[in-house]
Image (cartoon, rainbow, N blue to C red):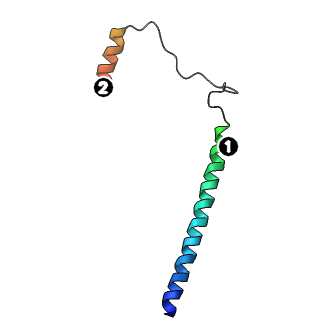
Amino acid sequence: MQTIVRAFYEMIKVLVIFVLCTFLFYYVIKALHQEYEKLDRYDAPQGTAVKVFHQEDDSDLWDRLNIFFRLGE
């Protein structure tokens, strides 16, 4: 009988620790989400940022199709 009570006590300790760690993890993730939610991803770049994408208007459709079929993309 004593071993059953001891095993039940150990299971309760593990369950309590698991629940506490789960709540801690949840609230840390929630705080991180709120912190990063405030940042605006579409702000103008600061410093020496370079525009990465530049579309060339002088290429015609056939050249683009040729490159598409050659590269297989």
Could you give the CA–CA distance between mark 2 and mark 1, rounded to whole angstroms?
42 Å
- Which amino acid does the dot numbered 1 rest on? Glu
Q: Which mark is on residue 48? A: none
Comparing 33 with 72, the one in front is 33
Residue at left 61%, top 60%?
A: 23
Residue at left 60%, top 58%?
A: 25
How far across and how far down the image is residue 14, in percent?
55, 74
**Relative vertical location of residue 28 with respect to residue 2 in this rendering, above or below:** above
Q: From this viewpoint, which residue is outermost toward the right?
A: 47
Q: Which residue is labeled 2 in the image?
A: 72
Name the element at disc 2.
loop
**Relative vertical location of residue 70 with respect to residue 59 in this rendering, above or below:** below
How far across and how far down the image is residue 73, in percent?
34, 26
**Relative vertical location of residue 36 with respect to residue 2 in this rendering, above or below:** above
Can you tell which quarter of the image residue 72 is in? Answer: top left
Name the element at disc 1.
helix
Residue at left 64%, top 41%?
A: 36
**Relative vertical location of residue 37 with respect to residue 58 in this rendering, above or below:** below
Q: Which mark is on residue 35? A: 1
Residue at left 55%, top 82%?
A: 9
Closer to the chain start, of discs 2 and 1, is 1
